[in-house]
Image (cartoon, rainbow, N blue to C red):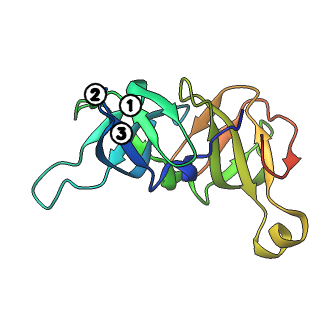
Amino acid sequence: MRVPRGSDLVGLPVLAGPELRRIGRVQEVLLSHDGSRVCGLQLEGGGWLKAPRVLDYVAVKMVGPTHLIADETYLPEEVETRCCHALHGLPVLGSGGAEIGLVDDVFFDAENGQLTALQLSHGFVDDLLCGKEILPLAGPLYTGEAAILLNEPGETFGGALS
């Protein structure tokens, strides 16, 4: 089974109910405040005076390559989240404080939204020559405003997870 990336969801249509009615398109992936799991999907729409609709990730029944199928259950506005794209470019630090790379994307378990790996960049030229690295998450992940600290970094792999 393919492990989805956060960026894979952006732009996908969301279908809900037994009649598979289209309720929107994913505009942004939202992570829990601690950055450890996908907790919501912000749908396009909303508006200038209207709050955006945020689908609760628990309601997602299937993540496909071209569509999401979910129940129409929304996150309450008081739930604290952070945008997945806000992690893009943050340095990832190992337990000793050394920089491992910069966050380029996140991989997550489609069933429960738990982050399983980080896709790391080492700069444009290095990414072209060697590819981006995949860092499986082996321990706790501490996400701050300016960096991500791993308690026990896993082994990095080139290429994508499958």
Where does label 1 land, which residue?
70
Q: Nearer the viewer, residue 41 or 137?
A: 41
Instruction: Name the quarter where the N terminus is drawn.
Output: top right
Q: Are marks 2 and 1 in contact (CB under 8 Å)?
A: yes
- Residue 15, label in figure: 3
Q: Nearer the viewer, residue 149 or 56?
A: 56
Residue at point 63%, 41% (across, down): 4
- The local secondary structure at tag 2 comes to loop
Image spot of residue 96 (x, y percent): 81, 39
Does the rendering let one see residue 33?
A: no
Q: Quadrant of residue 135?
A: top right
Image spot of residue 66 (x, y percent): 52, 49
Q: Quadrant of residue 131?
A: bottom right
Q: Residue furthest left?
A: 49
Q: Nearer the viewer, residue 134 or 25?
A: 25
Where does label 2 land, which residue?
73
**Distance between the Cα atoms at labels 1 and 3?**
6 Å
Q: Is residue 107 left or right of residue 79?
A: right
